[in-house]
Amino acid sequence: MATITIRRTKEGGLLGILTEVDGEKIGRLRPKKEISHEVAAGRHELKLKRGMARVTAEFDLTEDEEVRFVCSEASGFGASGAMDEVAVGRALFTKKGGLTLEFDEAPPE
């Protein structure tokens, strides 16, 4: 099995961010918390939603691999309803609204 872990920064509201992996709801991500979910090796889609804001990452995992993401919320500039799409390394990120998702290079201790 492979593992997907999503960490949320302290910015943003207190409401949870709906978190889905491959169409399955795995929980609500609260500020300064994280969610981990085991999946089979292969192609996966991670979606985070809060109101009209949403962000999606599509990526491949190998057996026993772990990938870590960090989610933050923007307000004001950058929180528009425009759709953005960017490839980072081996993942494709699609964003609409004030949620940001990126690889987590420095997990908290």
Image (cartoon, grey):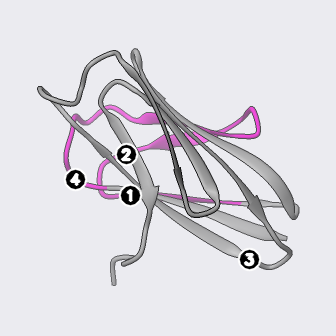
Q: Secondary structure at mark 4?
A: loop
Highlighted range, magenta: 9-37
Upstream in sequence: badge 3 or badge 4: 4
Quadrant containing the N terminus in the rendered view: bottom right
Cβ atoms at labels 1 and 2 below 8 Å apart: yes
Position of 89 with respect to 9 (left or right) is: right
Q: Amino acid at mark 2?
A: Arg
Q: Nearer the viewer, residue 94 or 48?
A: 94
Residue indicated by mark 2: 30
Reply above or below: 54 against 7.
above
Residue indicated by mark 4: 10
For the residues labelled 1 and 4, the Cα–Cα distance comes to 9 Å
Tell me the quarter of the picture where residue 100 sits.
top left
Dot in front, 3 or 4: 3
Residue 66 position, x and y percent, is: 66, 74
- Local crowd size for mark 3, using a 10 Å CA cut-off: few (<14), some (14–19), many (≥20): some
Upstream in sequence: badge 2 or badge 3: 2
Dot in front, 3 or 1: 3
Upstream in sequence: badge 3 or badge 1: 1
Q: How many marks?
A: 4
Assess whether residue 28 is covered by the magenta stretch: yes
Upstream in sequence: badge 1 or badge 4: 4
- Local crowd size for mark 1, using a 10 Å CA cut-off: few (<14), some (14–19), many (≥20): few
Assess whether residue 60 is covered by the magenta stretch: no
Residue indicated by mark 3: 65
Cβ atoms at labels 3 and 1 below 8 Å apart: no
Q: Amino acid at mark 1?
A: Lys
Q: Amino acid at mark 3?
A: Glu
Q: Secondary structure at mark 2?
A: loop
Residue indicated by mark 1: 33
Residue at figure coordinates x 30%, y 57% from the top left: 32
